[in-house]
Image: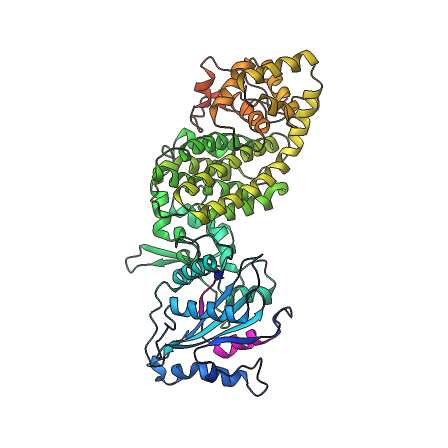
Amino acid sequence: MVPDISTGGRTYGLLAYLYGPGRRDEHTDPHIVAAWMPELAPDPGRDPNATLKQLTDRLDLPVLALPKGRRPVKHVWHCPVRTAPGDRHLTDAEWAEVARRIVHATGIAEEGDDKACRWIAVRHADDHIHIVATLKREDGRSPRRHQDGIRAQAECRRIEKEWGLQILNEGDGTAAQRPTSAERAKVERTGRREPPRETLREHVRQALAGAADEDEFFRHLVEAGLRFEKRLAPSGDVLGYKVALPGDRNRDGEPIWFPGSRLAPDLSLPRIRQRLATGLPGDESASASNRAIHTARPASARRDATHVAEQAVTVLAGDDEAAGAAQLIGVGELLDAVAQTAPASTRDELAEAARAFERATRSHIRAEHADHRALRSAARGIVRAGNALGKGEDGGATAMLLSTMVLVTMAAIRWHSAQGHAQQAAAARQAAQHLRAAYQAAAATPMKAMREQGRRLPAPVRDRYADTVEAALPRQADRVRREPSWDALAATLAQAERAGHDPDALLQQAAEWRELETADSITDVLVWRLRRIGKLPATADLPGVVHLRTLPPEPRSLKAQAEEPAVRNDTDSSRRPGPRR
């Protein structure tokens, strides 16, 4: 059961909508199911002699009785309450009980208070009601409705438990503000895809992804095509910012501005400054590692990000709550970077994944921002490298990263579940679904090529690699050989051996690097892990396939190679892609 509270200034306009046909003729039999005093509330839906004007006047009477200077501009309190999909349809009497309990819980009209606000509950559909109240009591005072949204949610949870309805996830006050009913109505009128608030939130998060400092963040906002203004103190210091979509104007023709704090709690300028204050690894403005990031190709940037994302899985599995909270913020920033540079084949799914995971980045646990510098650096590398083409090495490297990001979101689900963060865990699950779809699209071509190569291997070679898997993964070997990507794994081991690696040692290292139990496909994870650790091309070594030159292994141990920093000094030529052949 979901309540959604907002305020407005036109009682008649809201009632006209509730008693009208709806925007798509979806309203049926609108009528009052409960009211402050039913005998005083004319019902235009059931009484042919009652009018909307009469009902408006009755509700507004305590407001109109005040001198004009004391009348609140937004005097209308509106709270739709909707049951979850799949719940039984409540009767009018049950909806009346829901309405009375919510106006009591929120302070609009407490039980036994004969001086409370006037209110009604209108039903025009099977699955919801609309509670409308005017925000002046009969004695001229304002109601005490502090945190009315939280109290309404809590009352709905109690009703769900008592009545056997679906128990929805408890809120914790860290979610971004939802679009108001007026914003949603405007979307329907104008034919927009979504409310401007949500579009702006996505643009601001993408502008922040990988930004090294405040000036770069502001520059990204302008480059995204947003209307942007700073809020300045008399001294000239920047106190805040606000953004608006071009063309989004109010009835007076003025831009509709949204301060960052109204888009999401973590998008206020003070919170953004906290994130930027720790900087990025090293001196990003002048270091050699920064120059390497600026000149990296999309595939190289994605490979580096894969290594950093794997490290995030380990942190989330640990006991340091502050470090885990920081990793989730960094993962969200990395997803924003990947989404805005994704090829067309995965762009929509990745955008949805980033939007969903945005909710999983916020909780009441205080994050140690220094702990996500590596993730922010990886996000910066991806943004600076530009858009991936989705083919050849770019496509394979994208699949490599997305395979790991699915594991990261699974780790985020476990982390939030352990903390009791139901809404955040649900958001991470939703993000994981979109990431799986994006991975399947990105991996289709490179995995097909690898499978074809694996099928052409001589039977003795395939048998030898089956023994290699048995030795490295004794409990999971049967599952691996039954998975569709077994041929791709065999091809990868063959490619690693041709590059000078010991396939047994390399697979053992890949198997021990991170847990595999939660992977949808153990084989897929191993394929991409082997290719990253062994510095193999992200494409199959097939005739006619353009790929990067396979690099020989360095004399130090494989484990040392895997644990090296994601961004290294560009004087180390072993990290730079070789020439195409």
Q: Position of residue 363 (x, y in %)?
A: 39, 47
Residue 57 at x, y percent in the picture:
46, 84
Query: In the rendered view, would you say 193 is above or below 220?
Result: below
Tell me which colouring the rendered structure shows.
Answer: rainbow
Residue drawn at (59%, 26%) of the image? 523
For the C terminus, which image quadrant?
Answer: top right
Left or right position of 568 against 115: right
- Decide which of 192, 54 is in the foreground and name it: 54
Q: Which residues are magenta?
A: 4-20
Residue 462 rendering spot, x and y as whole percentages: 66, 15
Answer whether residue 222 is visible to the viewer in this image: no
Can you name the residue that lies furthest to the bottom here? 49
Q: Residue at x 49, y 47 (%)?
A: 427
Report which quarter residue 238 is drawn in. Answer: bottom left
Question: Number of callouts in the render?
Answer: 0
Residue 34, position as x, y percentages in the image: 48, 75
Above or below — where is 507 with respect to 393? above
Viewer-nearest residue: 113 or 187: 113
Please give left or right for residue 57 compared with residue 436 in the image: left
The residue drawn where x is 35% and y is 79% is 114
Q: Quadrant of residue 144?
A: bottom left
Q: Is residue 256 visible?
A: yes
Q: Is residue 48 left or right of residue 65?
A: right
Q: Residue at the location (50% across, 41% down)?
A: 335
Q: Nearer the viewer, residue 349 or 466?
A: 466
Residue 10 in magenta stretch: yes
Does residue 455 show up magenta in the picture?
no
